[in-house]
């Protein structure tokens, strides 16, 4: 009993211990749950109407789109700007599709497989012309070609070791699935838009009104008292005026996505005087080597020119712009002194070797000759060449060696901008562009022979054989290191915006400002490679100063101070005060103009009180009139004139954007040649309804609770 009593005396202690243990267990599970949620959130590129997309899912869509672009454009690489545009398109497509699918689901709208099949069978949808399944004879989409391809693709997938054939089939199949998905989305959007458009109705009354609004013209005598005639100093604006105006027009200042204001210092590192002098020495050496008659290809190579020498004469349009302009003042055989080109920041030296006339286009046919060894190929090539010289049929010989011998065209644009041309290719191109029509040549290549016959030459043009040494005037490592140390010292010694601004001039820097940065932007203040800086901006608090960022093309140093955060919702009055003040000033100037024009009963009265009088013709309701004396477009004036009858004088002063107005309608008539056709106008109004319905996306977009976190990943 004593033991039991002792245990009971420990009751409060045991309860506390057990409670703490339970709390620790629950807290641990809560922590794990929060950690998992946080990890999930950190992997989300964005969210639309509650539908989340992870970084892996978004990247998969980007890769899919990129493969399509590479296939359709025949390119292997896209520039950074093109990739950014593509990512924007992928994001916008995800947003639009999510919104439409959600709205369509509410209404029970779908695109069935049967509808898709009907679209394919009809073959009239413009999107189908973007597919590889267009009949070249009819110029129309051919569903039979698609069906055959899908059947062949299925067989290729089942065939082991299909190699490149299967890979090519897979690329086309992937493109088709991408296209099919987008076609289905487009059809769903068209259905939704069409349904919405049917909700906007027209009738004979609205048709007649629309006709009158567009075609009823009024000539007026106009009295203008421009706001510019009233000095700004004569208008007093109080804080109460600003607050009242802000409250009355608050909806104009609503923003749907957060933005941020920054001040920043951007310093671009450039070549120093010693860097320029060292590069100029290289250019002068190249000039001397050209003049001494050294092999131009070797001179260009040793100077590490950005423009390799191919030995192929090219048209002016294929030369760099500055080089094309330079050779106009040079003689054949001459070498230029080193010169600077500002627009591409380069030093240049040019040797003008020759000017020749060559065909822009050459038609030719060829037989490629191979063998077990190069010697065997050469012997076989010699045999074929002799046979052709003896009168043998070219196409017959080509077919004997498994080739067609078909004629094909070589144009200047196909080779003139090539960066690297080997000796075999140079020999091949030179032969084709210099051989006469009908001439047959036997070319010995490293791997075999090529027998070519030029069949036609067209468009003789001037071409230029030019050797170019071109170098960007770049900074050295020492120059960059000095600039970095100076900028780093500036950043480390100035930890606040006030200090950055106060000491910028001492270091030779300038503080600049950028308002309203959105996280959907791809870079900061137009600089490349600023993703880390963008992440900092949207993670910092107002007043903070960033670390130093190296960005641009590794030639910019950047420091940022966050000055303001504009959250989603209504902008503060302080952020829009300038715009509000302009509205208040205009209101007060109109009030003063109205007081000056009080008691006006005619145009003569208005003129007597200082108004400018002018006649304005052909005013219609649908087109705001531009008043030269006020320097502004005036929709309110157009509306007021349209409501008055011929001969009437406006019974009250009209408030415009640029002035106060009185007017008298001199004449009112329907535009000459305009006749009311109810059916035609009704059809036009119906089309306008569909266009108006097409703007539904903006409204749905604003209500979709979109979260865009792409800046964290891309």
Image: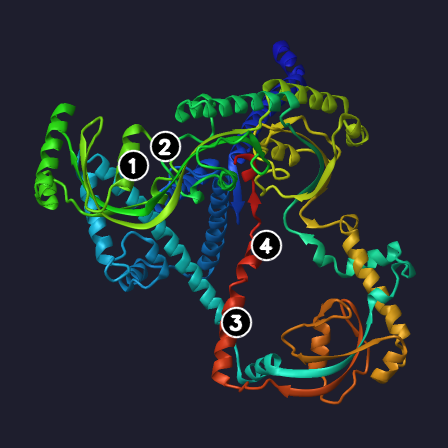
Look at mark 2 in the image and give the residue it sits on.
311
Sequence-wise, the earlier of marks 1 and 3 is: 1
Secondary-structure class at tag 2: loop
Sequence-wise, the earlier of marks 2 and 1 is: 2
The colour scheme of the drawn protein is: rainbow
Residue 702's disc number = 4
Seen from the viewer's position, the closer of residues 170 and 426 is 426
Q: CA distance from mark 2 to mark 1?
A: 9 Å
Seen from the viewer's position, the closer of residues 580 and 397 is 397
Q: CA distance from mark 1 to mark 3?
A: 60 Å
Sequence-wise, the earlier of marks 4 and 1 is: 1
Q: CA distance from mark 3 to mark 4?
A: 23 Å
Q: Which one is closest to the eye, mark 2 or mark 3?
A: 2
Residue 430's disc number = 1
Sequence-wise, the earlier of marks 2 and 3 is: 2
Tell me if 383 is positioned left or right of 433 in this view: left
Q: Which one is closest to the eye, mark 2 or mark 4?
A: 2
Q: Which one is closest to the eye, mark 1 or mark 3?
A: 1
Q: Residue at x 21, y 57 (%)?
A: 144
Secondary-structure class at tag 4: helix
Sequence-wise, the earlier of marks 2 and 4 is: 2
| Label 2 close to label 1 by CB (< 8 Å) | yes
Q: CA distance from mark 4 to mark 1?
A: 62 Å
| Label 1 close to label 3 by CB (< 8 Å) | no
Seen from the viewer's position, the closer of residues 11 and 386 is 386
Place of residue 79 in the rendered image (x, y in percent of width and height, measured from the top left):
47, 38
Rate crowding at label 4 as few (under 14), some (14 to 19) or many (20 or more) other CA atoms within 10 Å: few
Tell me if 371 is positioned left or right of 656 in this view: left
């Amino acid at each position: 009993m004593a033991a039991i009593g002792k245990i009971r005396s420990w009751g409060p202690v045991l309860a506390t211990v057990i409670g703490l243990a339970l709390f620790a267990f629950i807290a641990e599970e809560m922590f794990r749950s929060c950690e998992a949620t946080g990890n999930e959130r950190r992997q989300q590129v964005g969210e639309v109407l509650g539908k989340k997309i992870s970084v892996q899912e978004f990247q998969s869509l980007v890769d899919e789109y990129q493969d399509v672009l590479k296939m359709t454009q025949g390119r292997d690489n896209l520039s950074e700007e093109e990739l950014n545009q593509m990512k924007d398109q992928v994001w916008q497509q995800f947003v639009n599709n999510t919104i439409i699918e959600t709205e369509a689901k509410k209404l029970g709208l779908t695109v069935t497989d049967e509808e898709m099949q009907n679209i394919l069978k009809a073959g009239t949808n413009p999107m189908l012309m973007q597919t590889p399944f267009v009949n070249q004879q009819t110029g129309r989409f051919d569903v039979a070609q698609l069906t055959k391809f899908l059947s062949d693709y299925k067989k290729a997938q089942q065939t082991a070791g299909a190699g490149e054939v299967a890979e090519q089939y897979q690329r086309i199949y992937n493109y088709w699935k991408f296209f099919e998905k987008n076609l289905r989305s487009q059809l769903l959007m068209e259905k939704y838009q069409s349904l919405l458009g049917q909700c906007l109705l027209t009738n004979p009354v609205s048709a007649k009104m629309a006709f009158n609004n567009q075609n009823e013209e009024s000539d007026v005598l106009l009295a203008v008292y421009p706001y510019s005639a009233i000095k700004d100093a004569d208008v007093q604006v109080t804080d109460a005026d600003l607050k009242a105006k802000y409250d009355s027009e608050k909806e104009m200042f609503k923003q749907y996505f957060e933005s941020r204001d920054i001040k920043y210092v951007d310093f671009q590192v450039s070549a120093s005087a010693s860097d320029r002098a060292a590069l100029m020495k290289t250019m002068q050496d190249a000039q001397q080597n050209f003049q001494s008659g050294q092999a131009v290809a070797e001179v260009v190579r040793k100077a590490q020119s950005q423009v390799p020498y191919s030995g192929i004469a090219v048209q002016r349009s294929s030369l760099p712009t500055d080089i094309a302009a330079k050779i106009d003042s040079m003689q054949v055989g001459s070498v230029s002194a080193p010169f600077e080109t500002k627009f591409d920041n380069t030093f240049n030296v040019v040797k003008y070797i020759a000017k020749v006339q060559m065909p822009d286009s050459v038609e030719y046919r060829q037989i490629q000759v191979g063998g077990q060894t190069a010697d065997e190929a050469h012997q076989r090539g010699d045999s074929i060449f002799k046979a052709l010289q003896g009168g043998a049929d070219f196409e017959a010989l080509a077919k004997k060696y498994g080739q067609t011998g078909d004629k094909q065209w070589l144009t200047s644009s196909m080779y003139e901008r090539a960066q690297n041309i080997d000796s075999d290719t140079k020999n091949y191109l030179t032969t084709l562009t210099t051989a006469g029509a009908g001439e047959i040549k036997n070319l010995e290549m490293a791997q075999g022979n090529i027998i070519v016959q030029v069949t036609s030459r067209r468009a003789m043009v001037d071409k230029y054989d030019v050797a170019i040494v071109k170098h960007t005037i770049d900074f050295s490592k020492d120059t960059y290191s000095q600039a970095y140390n100076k900028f780093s010292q500036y950043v480390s010694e100035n930890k606040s915006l006030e200090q950055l601004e106060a000491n910028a001039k001492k270091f030779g820097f300038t503080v600049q400002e950028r308002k309203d940065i959105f996280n959907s932007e791809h870079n900061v203040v137009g600089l490349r490679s600023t993703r880390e800086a963008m992440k900092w901006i949207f993670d910092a608090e107002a007043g903070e100063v960033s670390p130093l960022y190296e960005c641009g093309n590794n030639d910019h140093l950047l420091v940022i101070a966050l000055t303001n955060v504009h959250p989603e919702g209504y902008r503060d009055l302080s952020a829009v005060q300038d715009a509000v003040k302009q509205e208040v000033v205009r209101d007060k100037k109109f009030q003063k103009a109205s007081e000056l024009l009080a008691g006006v009963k005619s145009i003569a009265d208005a003129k007597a009180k200082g108004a400018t009088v002018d006649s304005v013709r052909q005013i219609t309701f649908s087109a705001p009139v531009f008043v030269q004396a006020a320097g502004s477009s005036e929709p309110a004036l157009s509306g007021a004139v349209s409501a008055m009858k011929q001969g009437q004088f406006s019974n009250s002063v009209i408030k415009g954007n640029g002035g106060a107005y009185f007017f008298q309608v001199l004449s009112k008539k329907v535009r000459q040649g305009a006749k009311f056709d109810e059916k035609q106008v009704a059809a036009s109004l119906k089309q306008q309804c569909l266009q108006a319905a097409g703007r539904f996306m903006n409204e749905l977009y604003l209500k979709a609770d979109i979260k865009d976190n792409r800046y964290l990943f891309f």
